[in-house]
Image (cartoon, helix red, strand yellow):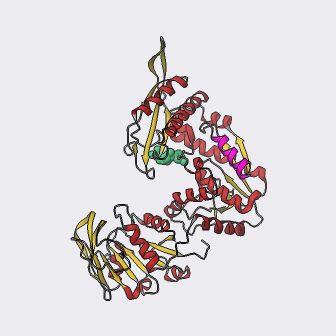
Amino acid sequence: MLGARDLVLIIDFGGQYTQLIARRVREARVYCEIIPYSTPLSEIKSRNPKGLILSGGPASVYLPDAPKCDPGLLQGELPVLGICYGMQLMAYLLGGKVKRGEKREYGLAWLQVVDSEDPLFRGLPTEMQVWMSHGDLVEEVPPGFSVIASTSDTPVAAMVDHGHRLYGVQFHPEVHHTPRGKEILEHFLYDVCGCQGDWTPKSFIEEQVREIRQTVGRGRVIGALSGGVDSAVAATLVHRAVGDQLTCIFVDHGLLRKGEKEQVENFFKEKVGLSLVTVDARERFLKKLKGVADPEQKRRIIGHEFIRVFEEEAARLGEVEFLLQGTLYPDVIESGSQTAAVIKTHHNVGGLPENLKFRLIEPLRWLFKDEVRRVGLELGLPEELVWRQPFPGPGLAVRILGEVTEEKLEIVREADWIVREEITRAGFDRQVWQFFAVLLPIRSVGVMGDERTYAHPVVVRAVTSEDAMTADWARLPHELLARISTRIVNEVAGVNRVLYDITSKPPATIEWE
Ligand code: XMP
């Protein structure tokens, strides 16, 4: 990442909250990156960070294979904050004592601040709620350190060596259950490390535009637009940098929601002025999906076909050197490829064949999702695009159980439109993570007017979630559900029953396939 702005490096020891630490630091407008604990000292120094944070981790410092950073990091050249395992490691490496806790301390604890004048706790109450999650404890602080906070079970809940600007906290300031944690982190970042808070969407855009221009030169860039926020922000950013050198391809596979293609075309062609190629591949996808009922096979067919269409269009464009991808920072961290090679295949759409080689441009690879949204708004993308709910790559195909046909697509598209319209109109669209309709391949008996019907049920699914890993069904008002049900049965031919899915994830998943 380029830029003259402040940088804080988070050294990862495998803690479950490491990403959360990074998000909190970014929220404090300080740019940070997560690096493996094994990163050599020289490499860390060459990045010229303002400070370091040692993350938590599941290991015990005294085990032979416990992950350890270079003790040279703790010589006082840079301010360091150790969190949980990070603090225990700091204590251990500098000559303190760490002992195995008799029992795990997990949950809320009351922190008693011993030194309220310490920069970390200045201006905060002397008693605060904090979140603990640890087995081991620092029993004796290293020479030069003093204890600045404790809890009833953890005598050393925070320690400091002012001379070397080394801090340790046993609790987790990054989690929501430590209500003043944000301020504690900000104190470390601003008052101890001297950061300025210069990480903003605007500064990110300016820097990326410069960097993209430098990388691309006079080359041509190709990218896929899906209608989702990531590809939209990535494309707008690259367009701002290199204009017409970017061509985007939008594949209409016929599995899109109502109005989606028009929304993408209107905005990107008319407003952004993007060179956009829309490919009408509806028939082609339907033909391939004919007779296929297995969900995984449907996914494979759609992924494969998408790549073929993209490949054909790319070939039509002639000489293209760069491929734009909307990869985000969590993908980068999870794939462990922070120093990834420049040439890769197109993972997001299922893996382009090996022989299709592009140099990759991933302008969002340093951002978390909430930052992508902020950058999108700064770039002038409309709110409905920036706050668009997640939509699976295989589209409506995974919301029609069993075989996908033109008629079923029409039913689910209309029902989905009603669900979206009513939930948005009632003002629940930002509170609910995803809301949609699913068409079941069974039929049941009903009566409409004086006639017996024998038609399909539609399931309405609406869930709240933070990150799609877990989800709960949304407690929507009964009147709203009643309106949705009445409208679907009255307005969508082929449906005579509406069900509301009241299962959380786990044990269910958000989608039905
Ligand atoms: P599940 O159904 O596994 O979904 O609880 C979690 C999140 O992922 C989305 N999803 C998909 N996204 N391709 C995608 O791009 C897929 O095949 C796919 N399946 C599920 C889903 O909408 C939810 O946000």
Q: Is residue 234 left or right of residue 315?
A: left
Decide: is 483 above or below 392: above
Q: Position of residue 404 (x, y in %)?
A: 57, 32
Q: Main secondary structure of the magenta part?
A: helix
Along the line of sight, which residue is nearer the eye, 26 or 40?
A: 26
Along the line of sight, which residue is nearer the eye, 474 or 402?
A: 474
The single residue placed furthest to the top in the displayed view is 450
Image quadrant in which you'd find residue 156: bottom left
Residue for point 56% across, 65% down = 366
Residue for point 56% across, 66% down = 200
Q: Is residue 68 visible?
A: no
Q: Position of residue 316 (x, y in %)?
A: 78, 49
Q: Position of residue 166 (x, y in %)?
A: 39, 82
Along the line of sight, which residue is nearer the eye, 42 or 148?
A: 148
Residue for point 67% across, 34% down = 283
Q: Position of residue 313 (x, y in %)?
A: 73, 48
Decide: is 343 above or below 148: above
Decide: is 260 above or below 408: below
Q: Is residue 279 visible?
A: yes
Q: Which residues are magenta?
A: 259-272
Residue for point 42% across, 79% down = 80
Q: Is residue 138 magenta?
A: no
Along the line of sight, which residue is nearer the eye, 130 or 21?
A: 130
